[in-house]
Image (spheres, rainbow, N blue to C red):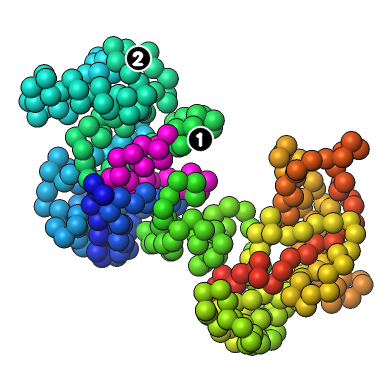
Amino acid sequence: MKGSDVIIKDVSKSFGDFRVLNSINLTIHKGEFFSLLGPSGCGKTTLLRIIAGFESPDFGAVMFDDRDVLSDPPNRRQSNTVFQNYALFPHLTVYENVAFPLRIKKLPKESVEPKVEEYLKLVQLEGHAQKKPSQLSGGQKQRVAIARALINEPRVLLLDEPLSALDAKLRQHMLIELDQIHDKIGVTFIYVTHDQAEALSVSDRIAVMNSGDVLQVGTPYEIYESPSTDFVARFIGETNLFDGVAASVTKLDKPDKNGDIEYMAELDIPALGKVKVTTIDAVEVGQTVSFTVRPEKIVISTEKPPSKREDINLFQGVVDEPIYSGFQTKFYVKVMNPSESAASTASSLIRVIKQHSKYSDEGPDIEWKDSVYLSWSAADGYIVEVKK
């Protein structure tokens, strides 16, 4: 690997009375595509600027491999930054923009030319070398910025929302290209974004941030399937999230696939009823917990499922709103708590996503106001937090 490990130790930063970062600790591995993900104002760009050397922390250390680089200016850190607004020189050609870092080093022409050609080829801009930035599309400008950042062969490439100025389709295309470039050159990428779909699709690992704190670090699978807090569950994808009380907890005979001891908990959720969920955390009876189940994990049907498995959750409801979007339909289903009295109007709205492989000639088989059954396995739900 050509990259460096980046180790962030107890980094804190305030602007006046406003605390932006709260004692951040992260280890980013050599050659990793690592994303800092969170909403605007969560501190992710400030952390990136501290790694780059454009900001200094109030406390803490930033290590590249085994060396603290905080005392080094940005040009001495073996890192380069790709900005959201490209930061290209408008009066220079594509060739000269990419060559600029080498010109600063005063490298001879015979060394500059093959290097620039190599990196223009890497970003697929060989035929645009003599154009000015004003003659390029947004995606092409971003490729020039990436080539210019990489030509110095940094060990760490920092990317600050590099695709946010592009339209949705171009952003997806550039994201794939960025991932391919990372695979080819093998340096450490640290990518800042507020777009969870971007982070999930390209990252080796993700740090989810909010209000100056790192809430969870993990692979895209871990972040999506096993969120550690209510915030992470809500921020990453769509989910159904409820508070409930543990009514019973039973230790299961067999450990899960990772060898962890598993428990079957039955939760009492107001306006929904009894919900079964498996967990590796020893939840105590009477504790209030947050429970989540992703919309795509729920099976929706107009007929009652035949399964008699004890770990299946089954509810009845009425389709309150179907939203068709081509490859899928999202249903908002109003579910009544079966344990409530008939006079009660308490209900809960559950989101369900059904993927389309095909539709019959008559169109969708579930429509507005249809009575439906919702079911999901206890293993497909997740206890996010145990409330204090």
Residue at position x 32%, y 24% from top?
121
Specify the segment rendered in magenta.
Answer: 177-199
Does the magenta run of residues contain 241?
A: no
Left or right relative to 356: residue 218: left
Mark identifier at residue 185: none
How many marks the image carries: the answer is: 2
Residue 30 falls in image quadrant: bottom left
Crowd class of label 1 (few under 14; some 14 to 19; many from 20; radius 10 Å) = some
In the displayed structure, 335 sits above or below 135; it is: below
In the displayed structure, 67 sits above or below 96; it is: below
Q: Which residue is mark 2?
A: 127
Residue at position x 31%, y 61% from top?
26
Mark identifier at residue 172: 1
Image coordinates for residue 67, horizontal then vertical, percent: 14, 58
Residue at position x 21%, y 38% from top?
153
Left or right relative to 318: residue 157: left
